[in-house]
């Protein structure tokens, strides 16, 4: 059995034993957990406009911009952006169908004719007696 040579100027000094190895573990300061990435606001806007179906073209554009920003900035909200873009695309298709088939004009003619004739909601019950 040989004895190791004494440390000299050519040999590095051994640090004291550490369970983490030669380096200290990385700490995050006073918070025990990382802060989550922020949710992209355009993704939320896209989903709201897609659900409301009032401005489907704008919702689709916001959804596509949100997806681009989420990838670039590392934000959250991919599902919101995709959902808003899909709902907005469906809304655009429905609007195009309504305009192409004349469904919108039929709807507005019915509203106009009902308003002209003074139509209102009936207040008589099933027995024919007015409530």
Image (cartoon, grey):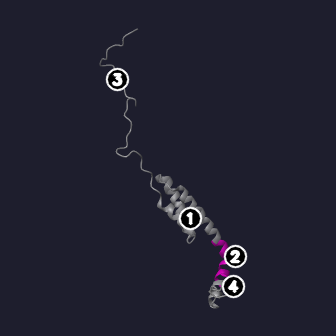
First reached walking from the N terminus: tag 2 or tag 1: 1
Residue depicted at 63% across the width and 72% down the height: 95
Dot 1 and dot 4 residues touching (CB under 8 Å):
no
**Quadrant holding the N terminus:** top left
Most prominent secondary structure in the magenta stretch? helix
First reached walking from the N terminus: tag 1 or tag 4: 1
Q: Which residue is mark 2?
A: 101
Q: Which residue is mark 4?
A: 127
Q: CA distance from mark 1 to mark 4?
A: 50 Å
How far across and how far down the image is residue 70, in percent? 49, 55
Packing grade of label 4 (10 A; few <14, some 14-19, many >=20) is few
- The reply, left or right, for residue 20 in relation to residue 104 is left
Magenta stretch in the rendered image: 95-109
Q: Which residue is mark 1?
A: 60
Q: CA distance from mark 1 to mark 3?
A: 62 Å
First reached walking from the N terminus: tag 3 or tag 4: 3
Instruction: Indicate which label's residue lies in the foreground, 3 or 4.
Output: 4
83 to 3, vertically: above or below = below
First reached walking from the N terminus: tag 2 or tag 3: 3
42 to 120, vertically: above or below = above
Q: Which residue is mark 3?
A: 14
First reached walking from the N terminus: tag 1 or tag 3: 3
Residue situated furthest top in the rendering: 1
Residue depicted at 68% across the width and 75% down the height: 100
**Residue 76, label in figure:** none
Taking depth in this image into account, of 72 and 59 the one nearest to the observer is 59
């Amino acid at each position: 059995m040989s004895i190791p040579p004494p440390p000299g100027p050519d040999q590095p000094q051994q640090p004291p034993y550490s369970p983490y190895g030669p380096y200290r573990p990385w700490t995050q300061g006073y918070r025990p957990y990382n802060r989550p990435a922020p949710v992209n606001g355009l993704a939320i806007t896209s989903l709201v406009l897609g659900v409301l179906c009032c401005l489907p073209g704008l919702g689709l554009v916001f959804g596509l911009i949100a997806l681009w920003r989420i990838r670039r900035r590392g934000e959250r909200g991919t599902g919101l952006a995709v959902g808003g873009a899909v709902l907005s695309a469906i809304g655009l298709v429905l609007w195009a169908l309504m305009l192409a088939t004349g469904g919108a004009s039929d709807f507005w003619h019915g509203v106009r004719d009902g308003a002209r004739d003074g139509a209102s909601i009936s207040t008589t019950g099933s027995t024919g007696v007015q409530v």
